[in-house]
Amino acid sequence: MQTVKLKLTKIKGLLKEKFGFSKLRSGQIDTINELLTGNNVLAVLPTGSGKTLIYQLFGYLVNKPIVIVSPLLSLMSDQVNRMNFLGEKKVVALNSNQDWEQKQFALKHLNQYRYIFISPEMITNQQVLQKMKQLSLGLFVVDEAHCISKWGVDFRPDYLELGHVLATLNNPQVLMLTATASQKVQNDIIKKLQLKNFQKIIKSVDRPNIYLGVHKSLNELEKQSYLLDILKKLKGNGIIYFSSKKMANVMADMIQQKTGLTTAAYHSDLSSADRFKIQHQFMDNDLQIICATNAFGMGIDKSDVRFVIHYHMPQDLESYVQEIGRAGRDGKQSLAILLYAEGDEQIAANLIEHSLPTKMEIDFYLQKEYSRIEESKKNLLDFYFKHDFSVEQIQKVFQDEFSQKEKELFKMLDYIQCSGCRRKVLLANFDEEFDSHDEICCDFGIENNIDFSLFEQKLNIKVSTNDKSNWQQIINDLL
């Protein structure tokens, strides 16, 4: 009992001293308690629930290095900058943005860092892995752990190596964090990490302050017109998601011209400096609207995003919940609107099909005609052939993945076409029940006629006018 009291006192003291908070949320304290008992933990906590604070605080409690496997360079950079701002200097990111000298310096001094952010591709590098093996790790964190299931097979195969990485590192304690994971995805994460002993902390994915709506248009022009119309009605900051970089650019220009709202496009074709600039202009309310691909958003912690609009439908409900979860992190009323025109599902289906190597591309690979294959697909095939998969096995892996993604796309379409409560349909995908529908839950009963007057007072949040920052100077300092 005395030990428990001491731990609670230490937790409260560190929480206040290092982060300025007086108490933890239920999901945070439940997860930390399981970690303190030595358990591996899979924590599925809703967007905006403070998942990163769990491993940051745990690092001070155990006073050992914490390794965080993170999926995106921008996410790593944001976390490092955030921790530096809070006064923690013993933090480093290891990723492909660094030149050879920077990587070697970081590896040489690896034992001096408290928090080590790293990509799955970097941690599977043998030189890096051997350096990691010399550390007495306090915790191995897989941030955005759903990526193991969602990206591992057909996009980022190094995620599939994390089980081997853990074995090489003598099986350190593991924390898996995500905001969205159905039972199938949870099982997939555990299986691929080869974990036998673990505890689950599962909280509802529901964000009751986010209104769910779908608007159906007859064609692309009608969809564009509706988007421009609602942007003139909505107040505050918003994110609009697109499936293509080209459309993000086109619509960002159109919105700026037609509505006068400060708008920028954000996607992977931009330089890291431009992405940093746009991200922080949005954080500081110098930009009102971001037209983005899914490259924007993971780990973004802007509390007052009032609406998220999907111009194109996502490929699955997990992605949709992740992306609409950027809205309303301050707990205030927010909106999630999905725009749909007949045939939009074909865009998503084409993206799924294009992401997987075809039989012809596998033949090109075997004939060493690499110039006829996209680099990402070649890297994918490199991985499977390196691990002694036969052609037949590889084809089966891709066919199974396509079938699974096709099923998930149909579930997404069911959500769009449903005639009942959208929240009930959404939560059912995560094995949750819901029976509390009201007028600010979703558009049930008012199809294609969202009543924005319901939100006039709730969404009329004044956009602050911070002094303009010298972005070029900030970029020069950080990059």
Image: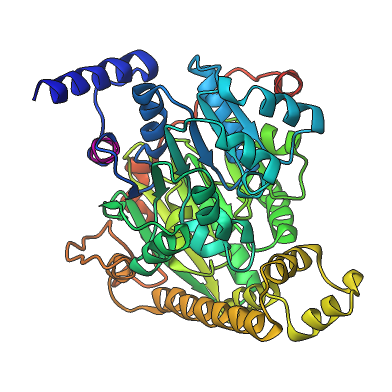
Say which residue appears at 46% left-offset and 49% top-offset.
Answer: 307
Q: Is residue 284 visible?
A: no
What segment is highlighted magenta in the picture? 28-35
Quadrant of the rendered structure where residue 33 is? top left
Q: Is residue 415 above or below residue 12?
A: below
Q: Is residue 467 above or below residue 313?
A: above
Give the x, y percent position of residue 82: 53, 25
Say which residue appears at 36% left-offset and 45% top-offset.
Answer: 456
Confirm whether the magenta stretch covers residue 108: no
Q: Colour scheme used in the picture?
A: rainbow
Judging depth in this view, the residue of 182 and 42 nearest the camera is 42
Say which residue appears at 63% left-offset and 68% top-offset.
Answer: 154
Give the x, y percent position of residue 19: 38, 20
Quadrant of the rendered structure where residue 263 is? top right
Magenta residues, dominant SS class: helix
Q: Is residue 397 visible?
A: yes
Give the x, y percent position of residue 286: 61, 30
Give the x, y percent position of residue 442: 32, 62
Residue 103 relative to residue 317: left or right = right
Q: Quadrant of the C terminus?
A: top right
Q: Is residue 120 above or below residue 463?
A: below
Say which residue appears at 53% left-offset and 72% top-offset.
Answer: 340
Judging depth in this view, the residue of 145 and 24 nearest the camera is 145
Q: Is residue 443 above or below residue 394?
A: above
Residue 224 relative to residue 441: left or right = right
The residue at the far left in this view is 1
